[in-house]
Amino acid sequence: MKVTLYSSSFNTAIGCIYYIWGNYFQDDMQKTGAAVNQEIKIYFLSNTPDSYNSFIERLGGIKAPEYKIADKSSRTVESEVKAYLEKKLKDFSMVPVFLFSSAIQQKVWEAAMKIPYGKVASYKELAESAGFSGAWRAVGTALGKNPVMLIVPCHRVIKSDGSIGHFGGGENVKELLLGLEQPD
DNA sequence: TGCATGGCGCCGG
DNA sequence: ACCGGCGCCATGC
């Protein structure tokens, strides 16, 4: 079986955003008999070309199912990300699909998605809510592998002492995102 | 199997 | 406020 994913990019205040998406995926087709779910599935979203390139490389390594990438932009993805950056949108409608994830990564990313807009949690607190109490060091590493920035709001995870902590997309970007989520 | 490596936490100085 | 040092634990090589 061959699955087609679409990729595109667009410019924003936090740099060029590269993304990969699809409007259905294998599981849907198997369960519903090829019924197409109109929901946008987001596989990748990042403001760094390096992480985009390595994601593409990993896709190429997959044997079954075979993923094919085509260029095609998504109005939903672009408009929602731009609206978010303009403080006009708090929650995204796109549903993330994690193609590559270890057990801890999946749990950590899901737990991070529960941190509400405008709120923050420490790496230690996130470790506890994800069911890996005590593994806060590994949680930081897992967040670094987040394939969908903003959708999994890893920018809302900061250090226990209140300082900003690291961020794959740039610590200045992390600060900007946290700032725009604060009420005026 | 072992060991170095991380988006960390905590305590001292 | 800012280190260094040690402890932490899942991964990758």
Image (cartoon, coloured by chain):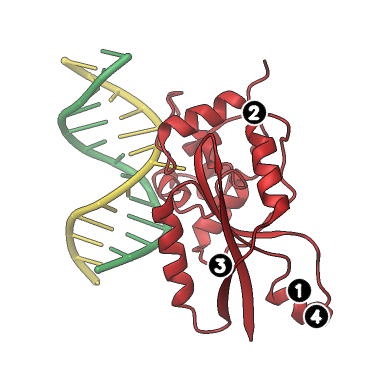
Chain colours: A red, B yellow, C green
**Amino acid under disc 4:** Ala
State the residue position of label 3: A99
Corner quadrant of residue B11: top left
CA distance separating discs 2 and 3: 28 Å
* Discs 2, 4: same chain: yes
Residue type at mark 3?
Leu
Which disc number belongs to residue A118? 2
Of labels 3 and 1, earlier in sequence is 1
**Percent x, y of residue C7:** 29, 41
Q: Could you tell me how far apart the alpha carbons at marks 3 and 1 are, in whole angstroms?
A: 15 Å
Q: Which residue is mark 4?
A: A34
Query: Residue A74: horizontal and vertical position, in percent?
Result: 68, 56
Q: Nearer the viewer, residue A123 or A72?
A: A72
- Tag 3: Cα neighbours inside 10 Å, few (<14), some, or many (≥20)? few
**Chain ID of residue with mark 2:** A
Between the residue at mark 2 and the residue at mark 1, the CA separation in whole angstroms equals 33 Å
Residue A159 in sight here: no
Q: Are marks 3 and 4 in contact (CB under 8 Å)?
A: no
Q: Which numbered mark, 1 or 4, is in the foreground of this view?
A: 4
| Image quadrant where residue B12 sits | top left
Give the CA distance from mark 2 to mark 4. 39 Å
Mark 2 is on which residue type? Gly
**Along the line of sight, which residue is nearer the eye, A112 or A152?**
A152
